Amino acid sequence: MILSSKCYIAILQRNRPHLGIVYCMAAMVCFSALYIIVAHSQRSHVDPHGLTLLAFVTGLLVSLVSALPLSAAMYPRSLLVIGILIGATAGVGLLGISLSAGAGAPASVINMVASLALAIPILLAMLFYHQWPRASQSVGLLFSIIAILLLNGTSSDVPRSSVSTLGFGHRFKRASYMALIFLGNGAAQFFQARLHHVGLDAFQSSALVMMYLAGAVFCLGMLVLFHGKLDFASLRYGCAVGLASYAGNFAVLRALTTTPTHVVFPLVICGPIVLTVFYTRFVDGSRLSIRQSWGLVCGVLAVLMLT
């Protein structure tokens, strides 16, 4: 029995890098599911504010269960500040995803814009900490700008209810919603990087609790401010989005314990782009314009260079 246990442990240790890849693949599927679920929710006319609030509440409940037992020592002051900032900015990003889907943006385009938010931490590091990007990252920043400009096109798969609103006003509205995705997710990634920089790596489970708690409070404020509504559809889709979000974040954290970041992030970020494009085109029946297709190509190049 002892010998077999030692052999089993040795096999696990020898396959830890492969286990990290498995976690990366799980994160790819979870994040792809998140964008697809949000896209379907907006076709069912689910209120985006209600969905976003319930997604964060679901993530909070799951993260609280995984973080038990709770204690004050798990929440140092610096974690409280950074956790609140991550949650609020992530709330902006997720709300932008719901609004963009409601405006007719395909899931693959929304995913690409969210992935390009990697440029924000680099730009903020340049602005506040004078950390200049490498040559490849500079080229990636340029490609990200081109990709965003190309992706803000008109999809050939627009909800019928939105046909009458097509034109400059519709495209401007969609661009505004995508800006929320870009800026919200980018700022959240920047504060997540600060979490590691100040040495709070041991508080990952606590950070997830703070993130979902702050996001839930922020989204509750948005729900009240914009007179959103909560119904069964919001509950159903919100819980699904929250579970996908938490599972994806959990898988990424587990992958980082065994696999280098230069392997994890390209897989986790580029993988969902490929999966959502495949789903949008071959399963959901949506079609991208030529302009948006070139935007996806530039976006993938940008993500690879930025990571």
Image (cartoon, grey):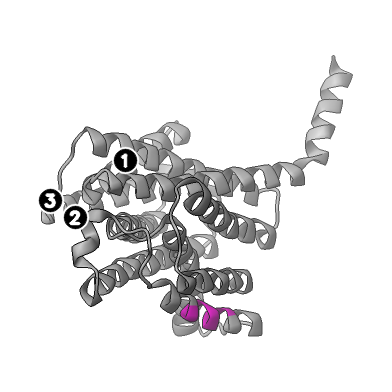
Q: Secondary structure at mark 2?
A: helix
Residue corresponding to mark 1: 238
Bounds of the magenta span? Answer: 140-146
For the residues bearing labels 3 and 1, Cβ distance under 8 angstroms: no
Residue corresponding to mark 3: 224
Q: Which mark is residue 222?
A: 2
Label 3: few (<14), some (14–19) or many (≥20) C-alpha neighbours in 10 Å? few
Kindly tell me whether residue 172 is visible in this rendering. yes
- Looking at the picture, which amino acid does disc 1 mark? Gly
Residues under labels 3 and 2: Cα distance? 5 Å
Q: Position of residue 246 (x, y in %)?
A: 45, 42
Residue at image position (63%, 48%) is: 24
Principal secondary structure, stretch drawn in magenta? helix
For the residues bearing labels 3 and 2, Cβ distance under 8 angstroms: yes
Q: Does the stretch in magenta take in 264?
A: no
Please say if 264 is above or below 120.
above
